[in-house]
Amino acid sequence: MQRLAWAALFVAHNAFALEAGDKLPEVTIPALRDSAPVALAGFRGRVTYVDFWASWCVPCRESMPLLDTLYKRHRDAGFAVVGVNKDVSAADAERFLKRVAVSFPLAADAKDAAARAFDVKAMPSGYLVDRKGVVRRVHRGFTAETAASLEREIESLLKESP
Amino acid sequence: MRDAVIKLACCALALGIAACANVAPYQRGYLARDDMSLDGNPGTAKALEKTYAAKEAASGGATVGGGGCGCN
Amino acid sequence: MRAALALPILALPAKSGAAAVGEVGFAMLGYKERGLMKVSEPLIWGRAEFAEVWEVRGSALVDIITGASPQLVTNQSGRPVQSLTGASVRERRYAGDLKVTRRFGDYAFSVSRALSDEHDYHSRAFGLEGRADFNHKNTTAIVGYGKSNDRINSHDDATLNKQRVTEEYLVGVTQVLTPTSLVQTTLNWARGDGWFNDPYKLTFTFFPTGFPAIVPDRRPDHRDTFAWLTRYRAHFPGAHGTLQADYRYYHDDWGITAHTLEVAWQHELNERWSVRPALRYYTQSAADFYSPVVPTRPPPPILSSDQRLSAFGGLSPSLRVARRFANGILVEGTAGYVHNASSLRLGGSGNPAFETLRAVYGIAAITYPF
């Protein structure tokens, strides 16, 4: 049974990759801390950044504070961030969040349903979605260039009407 | 093409292993654990480096350029 | 208009790519042999990643060696035994190393330098290493080259000034097997040319008739070695632990074949505490020119009675206890026992002249992440 699952993953990972122009997979992911799950369909009308992160992901130590700053700055204009955690245990995620506190909603994808739906290919992976629910930009990994261009991209998408 | 060749080579290499799985980038949580590292805590590993080697004839491992010692 | 857009970016946390991430640590090793040598070794080490593509790691240590080291193998009593002659040893060894790595996407290149200085032994080495990731980092290949220049002197003989050059090559591959296990296998060849003799060791043999022979340690001026190391790590979330198993096969052109097997289980008691019991087994065959007595008259040109070249086996259990604090600081304590004996050789037939070595060691280590 396990062998079948691995084979399926093997094939699935080559099948497709979520790219700019694709529709946002409107999955519902359990929340990291609250009991109410996070439904991505509910973010229609806002510019959303879906970010896959984990405590063991080294660039996340820089991407998470940056996303928090951008979230606070553009929240009123309709910008939202969803941090999807890929740690196997919530305790690891919490240890990371003690050092890097964020204010945007956090989801826990321990069972990989969301990661598979987005076909995440790198950690971290960020999907910038416009107000109509279309993925406009995919950031794989996080570097100084990502930081530089991200705010420009957000501001340009915020100008678009829902 | 290159990826396919590498996968074939890795499956050939992993003799007797039931599943030559392709682990996704987001599934590396367990692999990132300290106890899964190959070298262990650098301080303790360094301290142990000569402890056994100074009493044995065998040498060599996973690194190069380590240099020697009198180690009598 | 562009300037107004640029300003918010400047106000973003300047940390992007600029902050260094890493650790610094201290460790202290205490090692004591029964009746022989004692070593204290304080050491400091560090590792830092910065600017997204650079990593620097280094360490420095001092070996403070006291006690005695066998200098002579004599059969005066009828059987060959090790004998400690002369005053007890008081030695210091200073060593340091530095490794710089630069990442280029899926590839990385490293340069390293190592130094070791004692009163009678100076070593300078450098290493080059290349690493490549394939298959979404499921497979990693490494190649390496190293060269070591050693200078050997003697505090018994001021005129002794010898050299040895060793070149080594490494190829290896690391493969992720499942989300909870991985394996690494590496092949390591080394070729040494120069002085291999131990300047302090002698073989003192009495014959039934005639004068006894006193022969200094004389080894070949060349050594080719081969080591194949395989390391396996597997985490068992249900059992709250990780299995760590290492096996090394060694062979050289001095006739020595050795096997090393170490198996450990790192067990998580809870979020803070972990224990790691481990058992290491070692076995080696004797060098072709090893003999605890001078075998012929006149003595052979190549001869050593250094029991580190004889046939023996060793068993070493150890236990490590670690505590991780909330701020990330890690404190580790390790205790180990080393028992090398002729009877422990795989398959029996260890050299009867091998004198059992019994030693204990303890390591205290602390790591500060930043």
Image (cartoon, coloured by chain):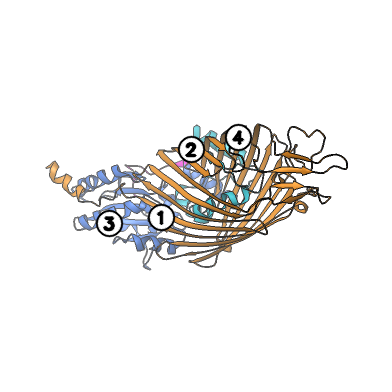
Q: Residue furthest right?
A: C209
Which residue lies under the disc numbered 1? Answer: A54
Region rendered in magenta: A14-25
Q: Chain A hue?
A: blue
**Camera-nearest residue between B15 and B44:** B44
Instruction: Name the mark nearer the viewer: 4 or 3.
Output: 4
Which residue lies under the disc numbered 4? Answer: C190
Q: Chain C hue?
A: orange
Q: Position of residue A70 (x, y in %)?
A: 24, 53
Q: What is the three-letter code of the residue carrying label 3?
A: Asp
Tell if the residue under mark 2 belongs to the same chain as the one under mark 1.
no
Q: What is the CA distance from the residue labelled 3 to the residue labelled 1?
A: 15 Å
Say which mark, if any, is on residue C131: 2
Q: What is the three-letter code of the residue carrying label 2?
A: Arg
**Camera-nearest residue between C33 and C259:** C33
Q: What is the three-letter code of the residue carrying label 4?
A: Ala
Residue C20 is left or right of residue B47, and the answer is left
Tell if the residue under mark 2 belongs to the same chain as the one under mark 4.
yes
Q: Earlier in the sequence, mark 2 or mark 4?
A: 2
Tell if the residue under mark 4 belongs to the same chain as the one under mark 3.
no
Q: What is the CA distance from the residue labelled 2 to the residue labelled 1?
A: 25 Å
> Mark 1 — on which chain does it sit?
A
Q: Which residue is painted at 37% across and 42% down in the image? A: C53
Q: Which residue is painted at 40% across and 39% down in the image? A: C102
Q: Chain B hue?
A: cyan
